[in-house]
Amino acid sequence: MQRRGLVAGPDFEYFHRRYFTPSEVAEHNEPEDLWVSYLGYVYNLTPLVQEFKGDLLLKPILEVAGQDISHWFDPKTRDIRKHIDPLTGCLRYRTPRGRFVHIPPPLPRSDWANDFGKPWWKGSNYQVGRLSAKTRNIRIINTLTSQEHTLQVGALESMWEILHRYLPYNAHAASYTWKYDGKNLNMDHTLEENGIRDEEEEFDYLNMDGTIHTPAILLYFNDDLTEL
C-alpha cells in the first residue's frame, strides 16, 4: 500500500541515507554524540564513548570528535598504522596522540584485558554510512510557496536521498513533482545522471563566483498532501 498516493518512492519511516558530508560529520563533536570518518566511511562512536566513560584511553578519540582520522590508518591493511618502537624494537601501533581504547600497552601487563573481541575500528558495528568525497550545492525552490533553500549534498546521492535531506524544510516534499530545466527528475538517479552538471571546477577555472550559478530544482505541488 502506497503511503503517499500519487508519488511512488521509499517509505521514509525506514529510509536510510547512504552518504554523509564532512560538514555533517563535524556537527557530531560532543562526547554524547561523537562521529568520526576514516577511509571513506562514517562511524558513530557514541556507544564506545559511553562504554568507556571516564577512561583516560578515550582522550585521543574525544580530541578528534567530528573529524576525519584516515591518517591514523594504513589504507592497505585498514588497520592502525604501525612502527618499530625504539625502546623495545618491537612492531607497535603508532599513536601520536597517545594510546587509546583497544590499543595494547607497549609492554605486557597483567591488568590489561584483551578479551573484547574485535577492536572498535575493525568491522562495521559503528558504521552509519559512506563519506561523500565530493559535495555540491543545489537550490530547491517550492513553486507553490516561492520558498528557496540551498542544500549541500553528496555528488553520488540519489534524488530520494536529497529529498530526505530536504524534509526538515518541507514535510510534504514527496507530494511534489521535482523538475530541472522543465523535465521531471528520475528520483532514483543522481544529479549528474539527471543532467544537472557540476560546473564548480569550470567556474573556478574562469575565476567566476559559482554560488551565483547554483543549479535550481523546481518543486511543483501535486494534489496529494502527504506529510512524512
Image (spheres, rainbow, N blue to C red):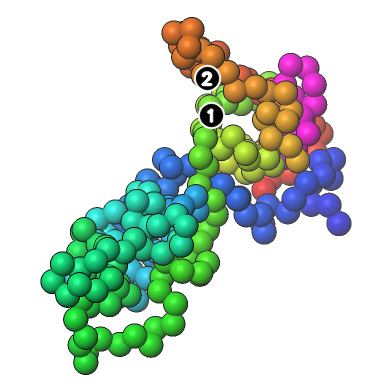
Q: CA distance from mark 1 to mark 2?
A: 8 Å
Tag 2's secondary structure?
Answer: helix
The residue that disc 1 covers is: 136
Count residues near mark 2 (Cα–Cα under 10 Å), then give few for <14, some for 14-19, many for 20+.
some
In the rendered image, residue 183 lying in the magenta stretch gets the answer yes
Report if the CB atoms under discs 1 and 2 are less than 8 Å apart: yes
For image coordinates 32% across by 75% down, the residue present is 102
Q: Which mark is residue 200?
A: 2
Q: Position of residue 93 (x, y in %)?
A: 29, 67
Q: Position of residue 159 (x, y in %)?
A: 69, 37
Which amino acid type corresponds to the residue marked 2 in the rendered image?
Glu
For image coordinates 80% across by 26% down, the residue present is 184
Q: Is residue 28 at all visible to an observer of this figure?
A: no
User: Which span of residues is magenta-colored?
Assistant: 173-187
Q: Residue furthest left?
A: 87
The answer to whether residue 30 is left or right of residue 153 is: left
